[in-house]
Amino acid sequence: MVDFPLSLPSLDPGWVWLTGAGPGDPGLLTLLALRGLSQADVVVYDALVGSEILDLARPGAVLEYAGKRGGKPSAKQPDISRRLVQLSREGKRVLRLKGGDPFVFGRGGEEALSLVEAGVPFRVVPGISAGIGGLAYAGIPVTHRDVNSAVTFITGHDTNGTVPDSVDWTALARGSPVLVLYMALKHIEAIAERLIAAGRRRDEPVAVVCRATLPEQRVLETTLGACAADVVASGLEPPALVVVGEVVRLRTALDWLGALDGRVLFPDPLGSRSRGETG
């Protein structure tokens, strides 16, 4: 049992905590997530929750895998929701553990609605979303005063595994200076083509971050026009984030992990714009 230095709520029998595990590094867990791990009878976890995080569960806790990975046999969402209800009705203390944040492309809202319908008490424990924390570990801020005052988070595939038709790619291309795409690696060529057709520059900076925040993290810096071919050549595989926009240039100054390994950082990656100078 973890000894917490402050008063935190308890995970009580019959309750379900919908909890974000963060982008991967166990150090990025919240205190409430750690509290839930220390008390849960059953941890129902997703594919992106690593073994180091699961090792923090209390001795005797049952670990149930309920992961979903594209193109592979996966648990069905209705079955997962029903399982959470069943465990609650058995009087178990249930921790539903999801990578990132449960309400950011994590289908936590669907599970919460199922719990409400069944009359199951629950708590939402937010986590650090990979689209923010994962990019920070790559040295890429999602906002920067000299680059953007808006950022858009997008899923790279719909429920059928195809490029989402519900996304107005033209409006996004024209209106959002920084795009962060989850689960987009499979369709990166089609997405890049749509953005370029809508007016984004072929030489616009793009970064692909794989296994974000973990020791095996890899970052590919490329451009919108070359990203599809570069991903194939690099051999990168999901899970991955794709970020499109000028903030990628900041990595030459902010790659703090690279600096630990000896990379030389350059303090003015944006040139004259970072000093407020104009042409």
Image (cartoon, rainbow, N blue to C red):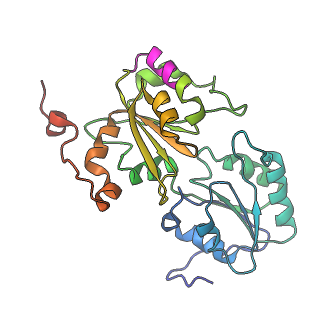
Question: How would you classify the magenta stretch by its main secondary structure?
Answer: helix
Q: Is residue 199 magenta?
A: yes
Image quadrant holding the N terminus, namely: bottom right
Residue 186 percent location from the top left of the image: 60, 33
Residue at left offset 42%, top offset 21%: 174
Residue 74 percent location from the top left of the image: 77, 47
Q: Is residue 37 above or below residue 220?
A: below
Q: Is residue 111 left or right of residue 25?
A: right
Q: Quadrant of residue 7?
A: bottom right
Part of the protein shown in magenta: 191-200
How many marks on residues? 0
Q: Between residue 265 and residue 105, name the one nearer to us.
A: 265
Q: Quadrant of residue 2?
A: bottom right
Q: Between residue 243 and residue 148, name the one nearer to us.
A: 243
Q: Between residue 108 and residue 140, name the one nearer to us.
A: 140
Q: Is residue 235 above or below residue 34?
A: above
Residue at left offset 33%, top offset 55%: 258
Q: Is residue 188 left or right of residue 63?
A: left
Q: Is residue 205 left or right of residue 73?
A: left
